[in-house]
Amino acid sequence: MRDPDVITLRTGPVRFGHSFVHSEAFTALFQEGMELVEETAAYLDGPGREESRPLPRAVTIAYASESMRLTTRLMQIASWLLVQRAVAEGEMTEAQGQAEKSRVRLASHETTATIAEFEALPSRLRHLIGLTARLHARILHLEQIMAEPEEAPPAALANPVATQHGLLERAFGARDRAAFTPEPAAPR
């Protein structure tokens, strides 16, 4: 039975990844990531070198380790963002993008520095590590959402009133239909 009051849309679910990479939110995320890469590179090549020279030996080793982790994490972030943008702009197919993304390891990089060593690092480096860790966590979350398998569109739900009405008609026949049809409400 076809109910003329029920509208059935023949569209499937909107894929989050496809819509996200074409959004202003992705553009902002891309910009944020690339600015963080530039800012970190400028710091490590300039003021960071100067700030690391007077550090005690144990802290210098922690500085080197943390700056390498920071650089690696930022390279992963930049690679992920560039692949997403390439797919969004049609420079890559989604299949090529998936193949490239599988080469980008968005793995977590736990620190090996002790709390004392980390706190002895220059404050600007600690700040950049924190910004990068938060951006990395956001991208890991987005990647998880985007990688979830698409759900099948839900089956069209039947109109419960029409279903009950149909059951009554089958049970009592169409001749008694008037007995089950509600009377229109009186105007107030």
Image (tube, grey):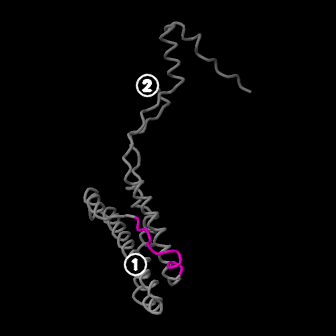
Name the quadrant containing residue 38.
Answer: bottom left
The residue under label 2 is 2
| Residue ID at (49%, 73%) | 131
User: Quick check: 52 left or right of 161?
Assistant: left
CA distance for labels 2 and 1: 68 Å
Quadrant of the snapshot with the N terminus:
top left
The amino acid sitting under disc 1 is Ser
**SS at badge 1:** helix
Q: Is 78 located above or below residue 2 in the figure?
A: below
Front residue of 129 and 23: 129
Check contact, mark 2 vs mark 1: CB within 8 A: no
Q: Position of residue 153 (x, y in %)?
A: 40, 39
Would you say residue 110 sits in the magenta stretch?
A: yes
Front residue of 4 and 145: 145
Quadrant of the snapshot with the C terminus:
top right
**Mark earlier in primary sequence (2, 1):** 2
Q: Nearer the observer, disc 2 or disc 1?
A: 1
User: What are the residue bounds of the magenta stretch?
Assistant: 108-119
Q: Is 75 located above or below residue 24 in the figure?
A: below
| Residue ID at (51%, 84%) | 122
Question: What's the mark number on residue 65?
Answer: 1
User: Quick check: 85 left or right of 116?
Assistant: left
Q: Position of residue 137 (x, y in %)?
A: 46, 64
Would you say residue 54 sits in the magenta stretch?
A: no
